[in-house]
Image (cartoon, helix red, strand yellow):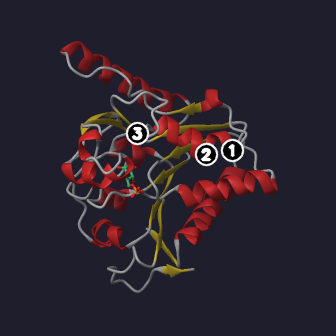
Amino acid sequence: MRVIVVKDPKEMGKRAAQLIVEDMKAHATYVLGLATGSTPLPLYNELIRLHKEEGLDFSTVITFNLDEYVGLAPDHPESYHYFMWENLFKHININPKLTHVPEGNIPYQTPEDIKKIQEVCDQYEQMIDDVGGIDYQVLGIGSNGHIGFNEPGSSLGSLTRIKTLSENTRKDNARFFDGNMDLVPQYAITMGIGTILKARKVVLLANGEGKAQAIKDALEGQVTAMCPASALQMHRYATFVIDEAAASKLTLETYEHG
Ligand code: GLP
């Protein structure tokens, strides 16, 4: 695994953009897996800058987002549909028809609803396979080691499905919902860990001390469902781009700096 330690979130965004853009330029068509949360914002800002200042072309890029809350309309300010549009898509020349975010705005109560949601999840997984798979998957990490919304205990072979959010994650994400945990949805649709492992390349971003333990567990701990990000130890081409604070609990001396 490749670990690149940089000084701050801005550098993290630049370094991750470099990795992705280099790979993007080497392919005629490109499938990008995208993440939400505060961590990928410096990366998205850099991609926007590269588009505006250097003409980086997104017109044929296909995107698939990792996850979406269940029960939020796409125009809800905290839905991931809205997040992607506001923070990346509206600033670049992407074709909206080539962007995909799981459809979470469907009822989840009756057995028929549950069946319908699983169908939506299976279709999402199929759509990814149909375009030939994801070339580069961007990931953040939860303070409990989750990736996408694959909470601790998730099967390391899981595919796209509905997950119940842990109390830890709902507490962490309450900051986006007026600090009120009760407003954070209880369920989400997420690519599985198996889906993420199918991507050709993966880059995980993390900044801040709050992520230091999760990063330590993911990189230097055992591969375990209790730290879903540790599954990336099984990936052939996984890179972690993390700032010094997120790297502060790591012990190996062989990581790249800068
Ligand atoms: C959410 C997302 C994850 C993200 C995590 C961390 O739970 N589903 O994909 O990695 O939040 O968010 P942040 O980057 O804001 O710390």
Q: Where is residue 50 in the image (x, y as percent from the top left)?
A: 73, 56
Q: Which of marks 2 and 3 is nearer the N terminus?
A: 3
Tell me the kind of residue under disc 3.
Asp
Which residue, given by chain and number where applicable, does mark 1 sit on? 91
Q: Where is residue 54 in the image (x, y as percent from the top left)?
A: 80, 56
Q: How far apart are marks 2 and 1 (CA)?
A: 6 Å
Q: Where is residue 52 in the image (x, y as percent from the top left)?
A: 77, 52
119, 50: nearer the viewer = 50
Residue at horizontal 30 percent and vertical 66 percent from the top = 214
Tell me the crowding category of disc 1: few under 14, some 14 to 19, or many 20 or more residues within 10 angstroms, Cα based: some
Mark 1 lies on a secondary structure that is helix
Instruction: Please say if 209 is above or below 133.
Output: below
Q: How far apart are marks 2 and 3 (CA)?
A: 16 Å
Instruction: For marks 3 and 1, give the one nearer the viewer.
Output: 1
Question: Image quadrant for the C terminus?
Answer: bottom right
Which residue, given by chain and number where applicable, does mark 2 sit on? 88
Residue at horizontal 46 percent and vertical 70 percent from the top = 242
Q: Residue lying farthest bottom?
A: 253
Tell me the crowding category of disc 2: few under 14, some 14 to 19, or many 20 or more residues within 10 angstroms, Cα based: some
Instruction: Please say if 246 is above or below 100.
Output: below
231, 171: nearer the viewer = 171
Q: Where is residue 179 in the image (x, y as percent from the top left)?
A: 31, 51
Mark identifier at residue 177: none
Give the mark count: 3
Which residue, given by chain and number where applicable, does mark 3 sit on? 67
- Residue 113 placement: quadrant: top left
